[in-house]
Image: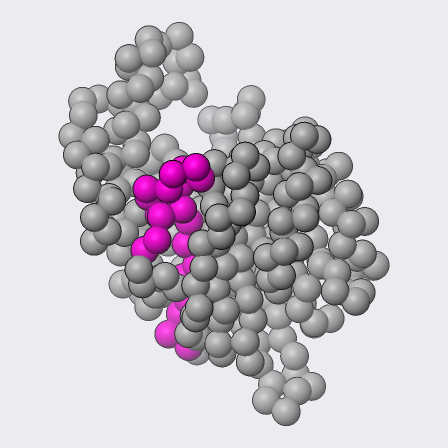
Amino acid sequence: MSIKVAAWNLKNGLGDETRSGQIVEEIKKLDADIVVLPEASQEEDLQDVVDELRQEFTENNGYVVDDGYMVGAALYEDKDRRLDRHGMIVLNRLFIGSCVVEESLGDRNGMYVETSDPDTSTPFTFHAFGVHFDDRSEASRLQQAQATDFFLRRFDGTPRIIAGDFNSMPRQAIRSGVGRVARLLPARYPTTERPHISPIKRGANVLHRFGAMASGGTLQMLEAVGFEDADPDHQPTWPNAHPRFQLDHIMVSGEAHAFPFQVHDRSDGLSDHRAISATIET
């Protein structure tokens, strides 16, 4: 059995009427069975976006109709981002025996997808998690990755997939070297709590956070518990115009194999990230 999984950080694009129509068309072109959309919209737009997607993709009472999608959404619930909260959306078009539900990862939420088809000649079940790990702290990213693994560990022995914006770079990638140097910069300045800080200090904070992403700790933790990056070449996904760093990933457990992997380049102007996809063989 094979399925196609895609992920695309939208930089709140589905809540922006100047971009949303084009984004929906690009999602259709991805032609993926499961689509993880981190930062799909801001909190105040999320319910309207979900309603519009359900209409667009022909969802009827929780059942998939024709080539439509089930649509699930979750707010991140970051306790220190009350004025700047985002929502994630996950689309799933696989089988009637599916679910898309919100799950807590501690101080941020993710989206869990379960799909099973017991009526085929070879019955199977697989489990996927859509994530957007915190961009500000390696400690937070590790906590969220550990919570994701803890949730999926109960399904050990079946194919498991984690997809989305990890805000973490593979340490072995050459492109991460610049980020690791940035980590040596002096103290961090929490811009969400001190908006009055100077542009220089704000820039230092961003560079320091970027350096922490390049440490590779979050990806190494997931690899240590049995997940593999679907892209062994670690192709860059950000920034969109001239990608230099791989922040977006699809990781699979040992019970599944991913090929081929693709970074899509047709989304100029729609987001600061490029979409990714992989076909998962189970």
Asked if residue 41 is positioned above or below residue 235 in the image, the reply reads above
Q: Is residue 79 magenta?
A: no
* Residue at horizontal 52 percent and vertical 39 percent from the top: 268
Q: Nearer the viewer, residue 149 or 254?
A: 254
**Which residue is at the front of the view, 260 or 75?**
260
**Residue 266 visible somewhere in the drawing:** yes
Measured along the vertical axis of the image, is residue 73 above or below residue 13?
A: below
Work out whether residue 110 can be spotted. no
Numbered circles on residues, count? 0
Q: Is residue 67 found left or right of 195 in the rendered image?
A: right
Q: Does 101 sit left or right of 60 as displayed? A: left
Q: Position of residue 192 (x, y in %)?
A: 43, 20
Extreme-right residue of the structure: 60
> Which image quarter is the N terminus in?
bottom right
Residue at coordinates 30% horizontally, 60% vertically from top-left?
233
**Magenta highlight range:** 234-255
In magenta segment, residue 241: yes
Q: Along the horizontal axis of the image, is 29 left or right of 193?
A: right
Q: Position of residue 224 (x, y in %)?
A: 27, 63
Q: Quadrant of residue 138?
A: top left
Q: In the image, residue 64 lies at what x, y percent?
A: 76, 65
The secondary structure that most of the magenta stretch takes on is loop
The residue depicted at 77 percent of the width and 43 percent of the height is: 52
Instruction: Examine the rendered structure and indicate whether residue 126 appears above or below residue 223.
Output: below
